[in-house]
Image (spheres, helix red, strand yellow):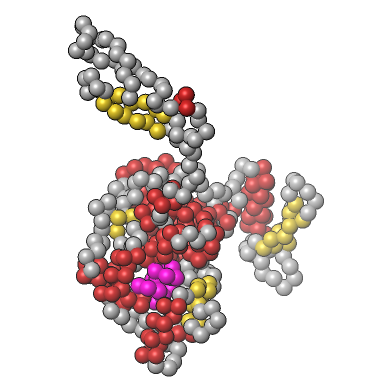
Amino acid sequence: MYVFKPKGSRYYRGRFRLSNGPRWYEVGLRVEQKELAVANLQKLVREKEQELLGWLPPKPLRDAALSPIAEHLAEYVADLAAQGSSKKHVALSRNRVQRLCHECGWRLLRDITPDGFTRWRARQSFAPKTCNEYLGLTSAFLNWMENAGRIAKNPLATVGKSETRGRERRTRRALTLEQFTSLVAVSGKRGLFYTLAAYTGLRRSEAKALLWSDLHLDAARPYVLARASTTKNKKQAALPLLPELVEMLKARQAAAGPGDGKVFPLGVPTAATLRSDLAKCGIPAVDEQGRRVDIHALRKTFCSLLHAAGVPQRVAQELMRHSEPRLTATVYTDADLLPLHSEVHKLARPKLPQTVTQKTGISGVFVSKTIQTDPASTDSESLEESPFVPTCPSAESGGGGGIRTHVRV
C-alpha cells in the first residue's frame, strides 16, 4: 500500500492490495497533503478488509442507510416514470409508500421492519385488498432498492398478504343478457360504448383511446386493435368483433365523417352516467347482496357471457387478455350467469331405486317400501310379493298397542 502523485497532478493517488489476492487497486484520494493521503488510504483499506470479512456492509449500503427514505422514493418514482409506467401507477406508488412510511414512523431504511408493517395493518379499517396493495407497492419499492444495491434484502419480503376471500368490500356482478339489452336500449349513443365494452372486454381507458384506424371493420374477420401503448399489460391485442357490433361502428363512423380521430371524441360514460342509465331501466346499481355494477363490470359481463356460451377456458383467457387462468375462471366470471342447473341435468344417471309410500288400512299410518325399478330384477323382488310389517300403536282387533299386523299393499 502506498501513495503517489502523478506527474503534473496536484492530488495524490493510492495503490493497495487486499488479503484475498494479488490484485492491485488504484484510487484517487483528492488531497494535496501526503500525510492526509496516507490516512485516507489506510481508512479505505481497513473498510475494504472489513467488508471482505463480512464485518461491515458494502459502502453503497452504508451510504444509502444514511439517506432519508424520501430521497430514495423520489428516485424510484422518477425511474418508474422513465420506464413508461402510467401516471396513475406512479402517483399511487408515491402516495401510498409516503403514507405508510409517515404513519409507521419510518424515516431511514433501518426503521423499516416486518413488525412495524403488521402493527400498522392491524390498526387499519381498510379492506384486506387495500392493505395488500399497500404491501405490494411498498415491496416493489424495496425490491428496486435491493436490485440497485442500496439494501441487502427487502425487509418486508417475509410479510404475508391478508386473506381476501369472503372479506371483499366491493364486489362486482355481471349483467344478464336481458339487463344488458335494456341498458343499451335506454342509453342512446352511449349504447355503442356499452356494447363495445361488453362484447370485446376493452377497459374504459382502452376504449377511450380508440382511433378509427384501430378498427378493421372491412377485414374478412373484423377486429379492433388495442394498441400496446393503451393496454394494461403494454401488449398489442386484436379482438374479434361481432357482426352486429360492426354495423353499429360503421354507422357511427359514417356519422363522424372522414378522418382518423377518436371513436369517442367526447369521452366515454362515467360511473355516474352508468348509474343514471341503470336507473332508467330499473336495474339496481347495487343488488341485495351488495354486488355493484360499474364500468368495469361490463368486462366481467363479457367473461361471464363467454363461459355461459361454453367457450373453452384457454380461449376465454386469451380474449380477456389475462396472464392467469384463475382470473378468467373465478374473478371475472359471475357464477349466477352460468347454466348450472341445465348442465347438471346433462349428466348420465344410474337407475336409482324408487320409494312407494301408502297408507295402511288399519290406522292410517304411512308406510313405505323401496322397490327396484331395474327391468332386469326378478318378480320375487316386486312389491306385490314382498309383504312387510309396520308397527302400529294399536289395532281394533287386538288387545294392547304394539300388535304386529301383516298388511299387504
Instruction: Name the magenta segment's main secondary structure.
Output: helix
Q: Is residue 3 above or below residue 386?
A: below
Is residue 211 in view?
yes
**Which residue: 24% across, 22% down?**
361
Rendered location of residue 370, percent (x, y): 39, 27
Q: Is residue 192 above or below residue 178?
A: below
- Residue 371 shown in magenta: no
**Which residue: 24% across, 63% down?**
283
Q: Name the residue nearer the viewer: 85 or 27.
A: 85
Rendered location of residue 83, percent (x, y): 53, 69
Q: Is residue 58 left or right of residue 217?
A: right
Q: Name the residue nearer the viewer: 185 or 113.
A: 185
Is residue 62 in view?
no
Q: Residue 93's image quarter?
A: bottom left
| Image: magenta residue range | 194-210
**Which residue: 25% across, 74% down?**
186
Q: Of all residues shown, which one is farthest toward the bottom?
A: 258
Quarter of the figure with the C terminus: top left
Q: Is residue 303 left or right of residue 396?
A: right
**Which residue: 37% across, 31% down?**
355
Q: Name the residue nearer the viewer: 64 or 271.
A: 271
Q: Residue 275's image quarter?
A: bottom left
- Residue 197 shown in magenta: yes
Rendered location of residue 358, percent (x, y): 29, 28
